[in-house]
Amino acid sequence: MTQVPDTLLATVRAELSTAQLGDVLDTLGRRHQFLPPAIQPAVPGARLVGRAMPLLEVAATPDDHSFGLMFEALDSLGADEVYVAAAGAPPFALWGELMTTRALAQGAAGAVLDGYMRDSREIRAMTLPVFARGSYAQDQRGRGRVVAYREPVRIAEVAVKPGDLIVGDDDGVLVVPSEVAAECVEKALEKRRMETIIAKEIEGGLSTTEAWEKYGVM
């Protein structure tokens, strides 16, 4: 497995957006890397950058109150890792205040949920970036259980592997495959520098048509 280095994470945090990285992934032939647009930050303006720790949650029988491997998965979270729950948007909460507290204590980068969170007021007062489809207090006990973690999963059309680069902001959540992360970041930095040049020329009177013809970037 390709490991995304800490220096790359720092560069993305400081300089790049999901839009810039997503545009570059398109040019690399990775055209389905954004998670569903309903997955949004609990706190507008929050930014998330880290390595994926994916897990799979499925429906439980009403008499199964075990949560499956959820606690084991949560306890395995390392520094700069993102709890990425593939669950198919079930009608119950996948995340709450105590899980946020535990993730913060472990130095995790955040949580991304294909479903809902609860304890929203408390989570919004904390510093861990949480991205979810919304808030819904229905408990997952007896409704859902984690059956695998640190294994590849799919959320909609997007494959998520352990260690992939996860980037989230107000424009969505992007999965950058670890094997192309370094190339993607390098090209995104080039794109960002070019956009700065183009913006100054547009401010000076260059039209968007002229900018596209001159630079091929818009």
Image (spheres, grey):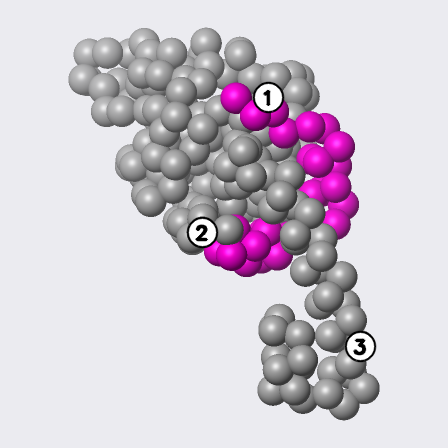
- Please check the rendered image and state whether residue 20 is part of the magenta-colored stretch, yes or no: yes
Q: Nearer the viewer, residue 193 or 47?
A: 193
Q: Which residue is mark 2?
A: 29
Q: Which residue is mark 3?
A: 200
Q: Is 118 left, or right, of 192 in this rendering?
A: left
Q: Secondary structure at mark 1?
A: helix
- The segment highlighted magenta reads 1-27
Are the residues at dot 3 and dot 1 in contact (C-beta closer than 8 Å)?
Answer: no
- Please check the rendered image and state whether residue 185 is part of the magenta-colored stretch, yes or no: no
Label 2, residues with CA under 10 Å away: few <14, some 14-19, many ≥20: few
Q: Nearer the viewer, residue 35 or 207?
A: 207
Query: Label 1 amino acid?
Result: Ala
Kindly identify which numbered label has been placed on residue 103: 1
Q: Residue at x 36, y 29 (%)?
A: 153
Report the Cα–Cα distance between label 3 and label 2: 30 Å
Q: Residue 101, image x and y in percent?
A: 60, 21
